[in-house]
Image: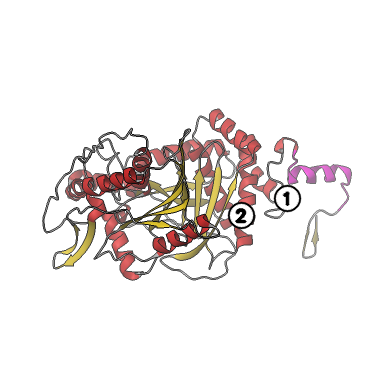
Amino acid sequence: MSQFDHTPSLHDEGFSLSFSQQRLWLFEQLNPSSQAYHLGGLIWFNGELDVSLLEQAINELLSGHDVFRTHLVEGEAGVKQQIRDYQWLALPLQDVTSEADAMAAARQHAKQIWRKPYDLNQGPLTRVKCFKVGPQQYGLLLACHHMVMDAWSLQLVMKYLVQSQTGKNKPWRSKQNYQEFVAAQASYLKSAAAEEDLAELARLLPRQLPELGLPRLSQENRDSYPANQFEARLSKQLDQQLNAAGKAMNCSKFALLSLSLQLALAHHSGTDCAAITVPSLNRNAKTRRALGFFVNNILSSTEFDWSQSFAHHLTQNQAQFKAALKLQHVPLEQAKQALSKVAFNFRSHGDGNQIQDDSLSVAFEEFEVAETPFEMVLDVISGEQVSLRWVYANSLFSDDTMKRFHQQFLTLLGHICQAPEQPLHQILVLLGKKSPGLIPVNTDYSAAELFSDLVDQQAAQRPEAIALVHGKRRV
C-alpha cells in the first residue's frame, strides 16, 4: 500500500500552467533541444542496497505525486497539464561491472539519458535508471525537467529514496498539491491584493540593469548559452574569516556573499549599481513538502555610495531583500521586469541525502551544467567549508577571464571580512594596486597601505618632484 495521500486530478481536461511554467514552456518552444532546464544526477549507494525497496519507493512516488505523470497538451484553450494514470514501473537495472571502469561507464550512460531532450507533449518528464557497478555498489540516475520539479522538490525526492533503505520513511503529506497551487495563484492574480503587491514590487525593482563588464569573446545575446564551470573551495582561513564577519555584522553568509558579488560586478562594470537574480523557494507552510515547480526569482540590487562602507550597504541591502522576499509569490513576469544576466544561488548541497552506517553509505553526484540561461552564475555550496561554483557562458567569457574574476572576488571578500567599516573607495584603490588575479588570496590587509598614503609619503620625501603631467602642465 502506498504511504502517500493521493489527490486525484482536479479536471479531467487538464489544468493551467503556473506563471513559471508558462515562461519555461515559451523557452522550450524557442529552444526545443536545450538542456538548460535539465535537473538531476547520480545517487551512489555503497553497501547493502535493497533494490526491491528502491523500486517500491519509486513507485510510491509515481502513484502518490501527479508531477511524475504530468505532460502538456496544446489545445484551443491554450497549454494545459494532464495527468496520466499510474502504472507500476519496473526499475531499469543495467549491470556494467564488466567494464574496465564501471563507475565511469555508468556515469557516461546516465549522462546520455540526462542530456536527451524531453518531449513536453508526450512525457514522461522524469527519468530513473539503476546501474550496478560492483558487488555492493550501485548508481541511481534521477533526472527531471524543471517544468515539473524544482531543486527543492528534487531534494525531497532524493531524501525519500535514500531513506527507503532505512525503513524510516514516514507518510508524506502536503497541505497543498501543485494543481491547487496553480489554481490559487491564478485566483490571487485577479485580486486587489495582487495589484497592491505589483505596485510595491515595481517600487523595489532597479531602474536599470547594467551590463556585465568583463572582457567578452563576443557580443551575442541568446536565450541560453553553452556553459563551462569550475568549483573552488574557500581556504580554511577565508572560511573562518567569513564566519567571523557574519557574526560581527549579524548577517548570514548568503547576505555577505551576495552583496560582495554585487560589489565586484559594479567595480568591473564601472557603474554605481549592480543587480543579481536570486532564485527563491516561493513556498509556505502549505507547499513546503509539495513537489512541483514553485521557485520564483527575486532581483537583488544595490546602488553604491563609494564613500560609505560595506557594512552600511549591507544593512540597506538586507532590508531591500527582506521586502522583496515578502513578495516572492508575485511572478516577476507580471512586473514586466527583465532578469539580471548574473544569478546567485546559495544552497546546502545534498543536505539530508547522506547515510553513513555499517551497512550502507550514500552520496549524490550532480551533473555538470552543460547550458545556462544566464551569462554567469555563482553557486555557493555551504557545508563544512564553503565552495564557490562558477557557471558561465563559454561563448562570452574565457576560462582565464573567469578564473581572474574568481581570484579578485576572493581578494575582495578577504578585505571585506577584515575591514567591513572601511569606505568602499579605499577598498577599490587597494584592489587596483595589482592586476586582477595577481593579488594573493587571503592577504592580510591590516598592514596594507593605500595608494593615496604612498603618494603623501613620496611628497614628504621629495616635495620638488613632479607628481602629475597633463599636456604642458606639471604638478
Specify whether residue 451 is painted magenta: yes
x, y percent for residue 110: 43, 59
Instruction: Say what amino acid the circle numbered 1 marks.
Output: Lys
Instruction: Say what amino acid the circle numbered 2 marks.
Output: Phe
SS for callout 1 = loop
- Of residue 299 and residue 139, the one placed in the foreground of this image is 139
* Colour convention of the picture: secondary structure
Return the disc, 1 or 2, that comes first in the chain's sequence.
Answer: 2
The N terminus lies in which quarter of the figure?
top left
x, y percent for residue 23: 30, 60
> Which residue lies at the image location 58% right of the left edge and 60% below the top edge?
214
Image vertical order of residue 323 relative to residue 336, above or below: above
Question: Alpha carbon of mark 1 to alpha carbon of mark 2: how far?
Answer: 15 Å
- Of residue 89 and residue 259, the one placed in the foreground of this image is 89
Tell me which secondary structure the magenta stretch mostly adopts. helix
SS for callout 2 = helix
What residue is disc 1 on? 433
- Of residue 8 and residue 458, the one placed in the foreground of this image is 8
x, y percent for residue 183: 17, 49
> Which residue lies at the image location 30% right of the left edge and 41% below the top edge?
283
What residue is disc 2 on? 405
Badge 1: how crowded within 10 Å, few (<14), some, or many (20+)?
Answer: few
Badge 2: how crowded within 10 Å, few (<14), some, or many (20+)?
Answer: some
Range of residues picked out in magenta: 448-465
Specify whether residue 378 is painted magenta: no
Image vertical order of residue 316 relative to residue 93, above or below: above
Is 365 positioned to the left or the right of 198 in the image?
right
